[in-house]
Image (cartoon, grey):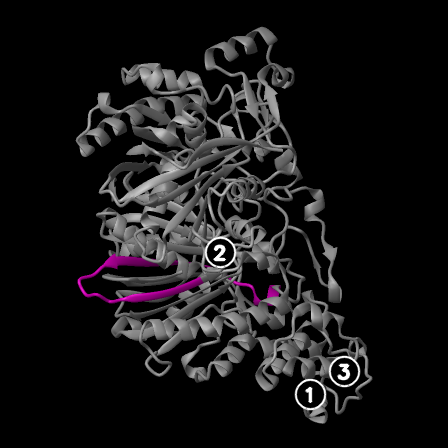
């Protein structure tokens, strides 16, 4: 489905990544594969380091740290925003909503609309759409969008399919009205028939966690994981991305009356460097326009990878310059989405560490 | 948050409750209760019977059943659905989103926007808010709001404080555009500083599931529960409901230009009969206008209690005529949200029993 | 505040015929979570005050409870 939004803009992005860094070379020791073969995979996929939270750290911890940083540095005032949207697949609790936990920890006002939305890889774009939609209400002046996940805590260290690339992070994006008549175009599609391509089988209410779901099983490809662990069908995801994403971006460009060349940057969800370079090849884009350097430094933090890509690649430049960008998020659901917007002249575009 | 929605209406509500009914008198032997205390509790809380889902039945199953029925009857066509909202605290998985699982099960098209919202007691009001906003964002005709909870899975069946009141249910509400202005007024507040008053401490990421979190621990009064079950500070929730909700009702009435007399029904979240009677007395609303009977028939099904309240108490009326109603959901978060709207006539406004296929 | 009337109302909640001010609430069979809610409701509807959850947990005798309600009325 196509969407058009007017008079909205992003005015700041802050990414929060755990200080704890692990390298593929360390991770390798736990895999069931010969070292040489793992090193080959590292080359091809572009794995190197990823950021993982310490045991027990939750999304509200990362989010609270990020918001406190913004308040302390006068980049945001607790009273000036009217909605706090948290997009996560790894909530602190099943109840209450984690957005209320964040609200409580920071003593934010009672008029604040707090919402927890469950989304992953396409979560930044879906979160932006939610923010734009809320800003149509007169009583909402500014929205704080938080994307956050700590999925390393549900990934098996003995699963070479997933562990090397997983990362934890949070991002806080401030969204407000734009007096200029800017237009933002977006496209969103979902295919629930393929929902089992990216999943955690146990832990919800379909299959509650128990000692049995914690048992590591050899899933047949030398990787060991439990039903409590994240499970990704790598080749299904790769094929899905190669087929659907270029098509969606082209349709979106047509809808917006724009051409591929006009776009300064493509900030895409970062499953791994290999997939992104293949995507760039398919779309005949130079790698410089489609950064793919996040997984090797921070890991794949699901819905947070797009803001991590923007903050880590553009840094201060985004405060002084303006770019025409295309965002693309695709993955769990299966969901695929793209957004075209002008991004720039923001108040902040930084990464900080969480200790 | 205060806002007005225009040119939208609810066109159908279907509540789905587990087919198996359990009676308080039959379950009494599970509880550490004297004859006298049981009698007192039954009377005060308005208990009698409740509906609990069979093992293996999830909130999504109840919602899919309802949605399938509406599709089969022709009340709704797949092509009309622009968005599917699933509001629950008991989702199928951490990932993928349950709304996508439902999308897949029913073969809904790729253009359907599917969203999972985590909300409880205020989840019907918040779900409606989200549905109204989605309709403004998209070209589609209809949004389907699913509310579903199987809170019985979060309570031990020997817990005499919570189990007798619990209920499981699912509901399907169709929201669409309309030519008439039909304003809907909303007042919504949230106070996260009191979030511990109603919480499931373990099982998710703060305290992951382990043999420790599954252990039953004795609380006061000889009641046992685990960290993966609902912990409620009854006194704090009681005070909150009596202190914070009535002023919001006054606010939303005034905001919508209504008086208590101009409202036909106050259709509130149904925690138990005692608190609802207290609220009616405090706000000087006659008991007939503020139904309080749902916990004694179906149990308290969290965000679904409002739709079950509507379909059970006003189902017939709403299929034939319009009523001016004030909805109010209050609880987990802590969140309290109230809405005034004209409701009905509806194509369907019924309660049905879930039958496993 | 009319204390005898308060003790009478409290006696009804505890299902006894009468109540001495120095009676320890915890000694009554009926002093459970339902009784607590009834007391909170009583405080609100008949005395116009809110008793906090922590406050009711720290009260020992019937007189403590009466004093608490009276203090809040001021």
Q: Secondary structure at mark 3?
A: helix
Q: Tag 2: Cα neighbours inside 10 Å, few (<14), some, or many (≥20)? A: many
Instruction: Report, in whole angstroms, how far the alpha carbon at label 3 lies from the one at label 2.
Output: 41 Å
Please, is residue A259 above or below residue B201 in the view?
above
Tell me the chain of label 3: C
Q: Gap between marks 2 and 1, in whole Å?
A: 37 Å
The answer to whether residue B130 shows anywhere in this view is yes
Kindly indicate whether the residue at mark 3 contacts the one at mark 1 (C-beta within 8 angstroms).
no
The quarter of the rendered structure image containing the N terminus of chain B is bottom left
Compared with B46, A236 (above or below) is: above
Question: Can you tell which mark lies on residue C12?
Answer: 1
Using the image as rendered, state which of residue B342 and residue C73 is in the foreground.
C73
Can you tell which mark lies on residue A78? Answer: none
Q: Position of residue B12 (x, y in %)?
A: 30, 62
Q: Is residue A217 left or right of residue A88?
A: right
Q: Which residue is mark 2?
A: B149
Residue interval drawn in magenta: B163-188
The residue under label 3 is C62
Q: Residue at x 34, y 30 (%)?
A: A328
| Mark in the foreground, 3 or 2 | 3
Whichever of labels 1 and 3 marks the residue nearer the N terminus, that label is: 1
């Amino acid at each position: 489905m196509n969407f058009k939004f007017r008079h909205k803009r992003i005015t700041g992005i802050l990414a929060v990544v755990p200080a704890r860094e692990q390298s593929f070379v360390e991770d390798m020791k736990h895999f069931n594969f010969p070292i040489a073969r793992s090193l080959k995979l590292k080359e091809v996929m572009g794995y190197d380091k990823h950021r993982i939270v310490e045991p027990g750290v939750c999304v509200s911890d990362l989010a609270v740290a990020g918001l406190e940083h913004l308040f302390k540095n006068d980049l945001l005032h607790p009273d000036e925003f009217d909605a706090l949207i948290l997009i996560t697949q790894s909530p602190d609790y099943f109840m209450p909503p984690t957005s209320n936990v964040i609200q409580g920890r920071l003593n934010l006002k009672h008029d604040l609309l707090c919402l927890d939305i469950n989304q992953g890889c396409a979560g930044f774009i879906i979160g932006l759409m939610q923010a734009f939609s809320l800003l149509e209400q007169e009583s909402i002046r500014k929205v704080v969008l938080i994307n956050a996940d700590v999925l390393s805590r549900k990934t098996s260290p003995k699963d070479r399919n997933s562990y090397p690339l997983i990362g934890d992070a949070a991002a806080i994006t401030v969204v407000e009205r734009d007096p200029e008549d800017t237009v933002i175009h977006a496209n969103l599609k979902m295919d629930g028939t393929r929902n089992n391509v990216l999943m955690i089988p146990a832990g919800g209410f379909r299959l509650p966690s128990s000692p049995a779901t914690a048992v590591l099983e050899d899933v047949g490809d030398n990787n060991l994981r439990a039903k409590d662990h994240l499970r990704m069908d790598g080749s299904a995801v790769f094929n899905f991305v190669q087929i659907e994403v270029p098509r969606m971006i082209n349709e979106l460009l047509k809808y917006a009356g724009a051409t591929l060349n006009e776009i300064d940057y493509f900030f895409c969800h970062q499953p791994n460097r290999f997939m992104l370079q293949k995507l760039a090849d398919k779309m005949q884009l130079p790698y410089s326009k489609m950064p793919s350097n996040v997984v090797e430094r921070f890991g794949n933090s699901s819905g947070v990878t797009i803001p991590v890509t923007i903050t880590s690649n553009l840094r201060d430049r985004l405060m002084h310059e303006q770019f025409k960008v295309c965002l693309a998020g695709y993955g769990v659901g299966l969901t695929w989405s793209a957004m075209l917007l002008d991004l720039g002249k923001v108040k902040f575009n930084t990464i900080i560490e969480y200790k | 948050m205060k806002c007005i929605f225009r040119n939208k209406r609810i066109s159908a509500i279907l509540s789905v409750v587990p087919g198996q009914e359990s009676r308080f008198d039959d379950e009494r032997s599970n509880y550490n209760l004297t004859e006298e205390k049981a009698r007192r509790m039954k009377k005060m809380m308005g208990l009698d019977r409740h509906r609990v889902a069979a093992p293996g039945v999830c909130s999504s199953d109840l919602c899919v059943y309802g949605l399938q029925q509406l599709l089969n009857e022709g009340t709704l066509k797949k092509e009309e659905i622009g968005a599917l909202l699933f509001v629950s605290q008991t989702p199928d998985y951490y990932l993928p989103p349950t709304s996508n699982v439902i999308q897949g099960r029913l073969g809904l098209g790729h253009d359907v926007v599917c969203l999972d919202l985590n909300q409880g007691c205020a989840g019907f009001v918040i779900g409606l808010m989200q549905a109204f906003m989605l309709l403004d964002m998209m070209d589609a005709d209809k949004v389907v709001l699913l509310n579903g909870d199987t809170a019985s899975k979060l309570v031990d069946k020997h817990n005499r404080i919570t189990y007798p009141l619990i209920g499981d249910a699912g509901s399907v509400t169709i929201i669409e555009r309309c030519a008439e202005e039909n304003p809907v007024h909303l007042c919504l507040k949230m106070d996260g500083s009191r979030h511990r008053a109603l919480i499931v401490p373990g099982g998710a990421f703060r305290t992951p599931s382990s043999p420790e979190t599954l252990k039953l621990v004795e609380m006061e009064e000889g009641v046992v529960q685990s960290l993966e079950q609902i912990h409620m500070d009854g006194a704090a929730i009681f005070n909150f409901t009596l202190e914070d909700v009535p002023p919001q009702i006054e606010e939303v009435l005034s905001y919508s230009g209504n008086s208590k007399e101009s409202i036909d029904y106050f259709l509130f979240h149904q925690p138990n009969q005692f608190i609802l009677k207290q609220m009616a007395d405090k706000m000087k609303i006659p008991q007939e206008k503020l139904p309080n009977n749902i916990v004694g028939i179906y149990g308290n099904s969290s965000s679904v209690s409002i739709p079950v309240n509507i379909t059970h108490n006003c189902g017939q009326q709403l299929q034939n005529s319009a009523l001016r109603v004030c909805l109010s959901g209050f609880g987990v978060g802590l969140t309290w949200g109230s809405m005034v709207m004209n409701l009905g006539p509806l194509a369907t406004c019924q309660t049905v029993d879930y039958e496993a296929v | 505040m009319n204390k005898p009337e308060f003790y009478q109302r409290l006696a009804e909640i505890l299902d006894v015929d009468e109540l001495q001010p120095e009676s320890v609430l915890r000694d009554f069979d009926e002093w459970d979570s339902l009784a607590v809610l009834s007391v909170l409701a009583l405080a609100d509807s008949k005395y116009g005050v809110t008793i906090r959850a922590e406050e009711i947990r720290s009260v020992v005798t019937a007189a403590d409870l009466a004093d608490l309600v009276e203090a809040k009325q001021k």
